[in-house]
Image (tube, grey):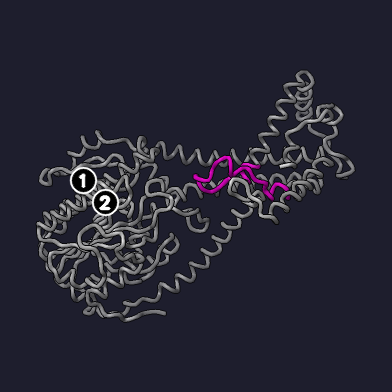
Amino acid sequence: MPVFTRFGQSSRSESASASASAEETPASDDVPVAPEPAARTTLRSRLTGLRARHPRAARTLRRTTTTLAAALVLGALLLPNTLPAVGPRSFTRIPAEAVVGAVVVLWLPRRPRLVAAALYGLGLTALTAVNLLDMGFNEYLGRGFNAALDWDLLPDAQAYVGDTLGGGVATAAAVGAIVLVLLLAAVMVAATVRLSDLLVRHRPRAARGALIAGVVWITCSALGLTLFGGPIASERGAGALRVHAQRTVESLRDEAAFAKHAQADTFGNTPPDQLLPDLRGKDVIFTFIESYGRSAIEDPIMAPGVDRTLDADGKALAKAGFAARSGWLTSATYGGSSWLGHSTTMSGLWIDNQRRYRTVTAGDHLTLTKAFRKSGAWDTVGVMPGVQKGWPEEKWYGLDKLYDAYDLGYKGPKFSWSTMPDQYALEAFQRQVHGKKRDKPLMSFVILTSSHQPWAPIPKMVDWDELGDGSRFDAIEKAGNKASDIITDTTKSRQEYGKSIQYSVTSLTQWLERYGTDDTVLVFLGDHQPMARVSGTRASRDVPVSIVAKDPKVLDKVADWNWTEGLKPDRDAPVWKMSSFRDRFLKAYGSTPHRSGG
């Protein structure tokens, strides 16, 4: 850009001692200059002496530093917020913020100018930070960072890194991120102050350059001129901050509107005897398979293995007397935050951010799991091997008992983030819960974790009778891939993700084949798609969902859903929002709506 091209040049007067001593014209700033401390004077004298003894080196250093400062400022103003967009083309633009900044600097007196330059540098630091956060969130969660909602996810991200790569790496990453931001702020402020001094030192030429740059920017903007597929006249920095500000305001408004919406419930006042009458006497199991998304079934790299598994497992279940129907649900989350998918499915509300999750779980909205408990006809349990601390949502879900990572008796190794293999978790569920005699049938809420990223190492199936306390998984874990070898390789991540889904599906279907009865009803689905690097940047948010049962009457109740026979939904099978599943399920099995609230 013309105004900054000037920064990289040096005139003869710039190297002259007279110009160096007259950094700013007194007429432009009438503020008297206080005497400098002796130490500062001595340091400046030494630097002046060095420049005098080595003029060529000093000139080269000055030009290099100025060029780097200009590149840093321009880079911050033009930096995209997605990794695929980062490239030389993104930086061939004229940023309006640079032109405006130059004009302001040239107009202000010295002290206000220095303050403005420092604030400008801090603003560029904030802009860079949110752009980098956007990159990370887009890469993993398929959406941008939300300053009003997402700070609570950062500790979860650190915990994930700790479980995946070790506590030392997680701590180093957290400390490194803080140091990086502070260092970036210091360097950015130094760069903007340096550039502001240079502009004022060459005020006439800088003013002409700013005027030319402004005219060029306005012309390019008015004519809609583009270069490499993007507009030459850029306002990327201001636009990014404006988007984040709007996103924050909209999120705060959404919170209030959602709180009111959540008070209304189609089945909130339904009497207990009118809830799920057509499933009375059945053991019903709702199971979420981590990251089980549409890409696992349709992506050319993952699909062949997963599809073979679904076909083989479906045939094995059919041989055991089970039938299945499958469709698609559009998840409220993507790439992570599994609890948003769980709560959306069970509540019938669209819970796509942490604020909504906190709002609804703090209330008494009827969940699908709680409907079983409210009916009085079922005992209700949760089996969650991924829960390793207090989980107050247990009450909101309406669970009589929760079995977390410490309640299942596992003595084997962790598999990266996953505390135990799915096969072991299901066997422990059978041993401690499902296989025991009871006065009422059981409604179970099971969350499987072996297909959680980074998909290394992955457990392998072992003989069900030899699972024991899980110690035999030691050798399997040691022989598996290391997370650090998989997490940075897109191709390997996709391959291993597919294998993890195969493992989780097989664990579940073999458990059902082994322990299912005429009265067992299994509903299993994914919570969300895997992260964008695995599922693809334009992947849908759809996840497979299946209902499996021996009793044909169970599947007859959902015949009008037009789901696909078997465990693999067709491409054109119905696609519903995940939030619609609760009401459809309740109605299909005889529940009578009685609205509560708004």
Q: Position of residue 425 (x, y in %)?
A: 21, 50
What type is the residue that disc 1 sits on? Tyr
What type is the residue that disc 2 sits on? Pro
In the image, is residue 446 above or below residue 19? below
Q: Which residue is mark 2?
A: 385
| CA distance separating discs 2 and 1 | 10 Å
User: What secondary structure characterizes most of the magenta part?
Assistant: helix
* 75 magenta-colored: yes
- Identify the element where label 1 is drawn: loop
Q: Which residues are magenta?
A: 74-100
Density class for disc 1 (Cα within 10 Å; few <14, some 14-19, many ≥20) is: many
Q: Position of residue 538 (x, y in %)?
A: 43, 53
Q: Which residue is mark 1?
A: 410
Q: Is residue 491 left or right of residue 150?
A: left
In the image, is residue 318 above or below residue 16? below
Q: Position of residue 389 (x, y in %)?
A: 33, 52
Instruction: Tell me what residue is drawn at x 48 percent, y 67 percent.
Output: 255
Q: How many labels sit on residues? A: 2
Question: Is residue 306 in view from this perspective?
Answer: yes
| Quarter of the rendering containing residue 476 | top left
- Identify the element where label 2 is drawn: loop
Q: Position of residue 541 (x, y in %)?
A: 38, 57
| Quarter of the rendering containing residue 17 | top right
Q: Earlier in the sequence, mark 2 or mark 1?
A: 2
